[in-house]
Amino acid sequence: GAGVSQSPSNKVTEKGKDVELRCDPISGHTALYWYRQRLGQGLEFLIYFQGNSAPDKSGLPSDRFSAERTGESVSTLTIQRTQQEDSAVYLCASSLRGLANTEAFFGQGTRLTVV
Amino acid sequence: LAKTTQPISMDSYEGQEVNITCSHNNIATNDYITWYQQFPSQGPRFIIQGYKTKVTNEVASLFIPADRKSSTLSLPRVSLSDTAVYYCLVGSGAGSYQLTFGKGTKLSVIP
C-alpha cells in the first residue's frame, strides 16, 4: 500500500475484554514498531520487529500485551483483559531497514477506549 | 541512546521564523539527529535528518554545531498549519534500534 495502515481506527471495549489491533506496514519494510500514546503524552515504545530476528519486547508494559508479525508483513498487537489505563492511541510505524538514518512512516493509529 | 532535552512549548506569530533547539550532550559519534512532526490525531511524520553542519529541505532547516551537542530545527515563515508537536531524536545502529521519542515541543502558531 501507499502508507502504513492501521485498523480499526477506533475501538471501544469493555473492561476485561481482549482486543486485537492490526498494522499493515509499507511493502518491503523490514522494521516495524508499535507505540502507545496516552492523551497529551509522548510516544511510549512497546515492541520492535526487524525481519526474521527475535522481536525487541522490552517496552511491553505487562504480560497482558503481546504482538506478532509474520515475516515482513502484517502485525497484530493483542491486549488481554483490558483495563481502563490501556485507553490510548496505539501507533504503528515501519521503516525500510530499521536503521537510525532511515525514515520511519507512521500509521494514523487506533484509538482504544476501555469503558 | 543519547537523551534529548527540548522546550516543552513555544508560541509564535504567523509569518515568523521559529527555531526549536534540542540538547543532546552525550551524543555518540555514529548518532544521527532526526526531527519528527506530529499533528493532533495523527501519527508523527519525518521532517528532517542530519549528522553535522546544516541540512535544508523544502520544509525546514537543521543546524548542527561542530560539537554536535545540540541541534536547531528552523521553520521559516510559520503558518497556523505548523501548529504541532516537534520531536527531536538521536540514535544510531540497527537491529534492536528504537525510535525513542521524548515529550517533544508543542508549537502553537498564533494568527
Image (spheres, rainbow, N blue to C red):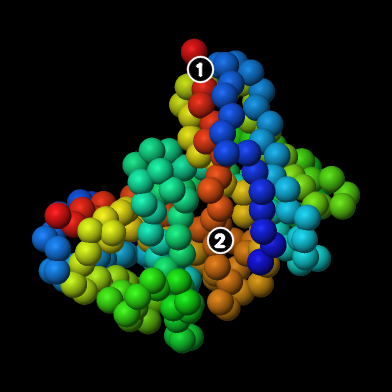
As displayed, is residue A53 above or below residue A108?
A: below
Q: Where residue B100 is drawn, which disc sits there?
A: 2
Q: Residue furthest top?
A: B111
The answer as to whether the residues below labels 1 and 2 share one chain is yes
Near-viewer residue (B57 or A81):
A81
Q: Chain of mark 1?
A: B
Query: Residue B67 location, x and y as percent?
Result: 87, 52
Q: Are marks 1 and 2 in contact (CB under 8 Å)?
A: no
Q: Which residue is mark 1?
A: B110
Say what secondary structure mark 2 lies in: loop
* Crowd rating for badge 2 (residues with CA inside 10 Å; few <14, some 14–19, many 20+): some
Residue at x-position 54% and y-position 31%: B107
Looking at the rendered structure, the kind of residue marked 1 is: Ile
Looking at the rendered structure, the kind of residue marked 2 is: Thr
Near-viewer residue (B65 or A104):
B65
Residue at x-position 26% and y-position 56%: A87
Q: Is residue B34 left or right of residue B45?
A: right
Q: Chain of mark 2?
A: B
If you read the primary sequence from the N terminus, does the residue marked by circle 1 or circle 2 appear first?
2
Q: Residue furthest right?
A: B66
Whether residue A109 can be seen here: no
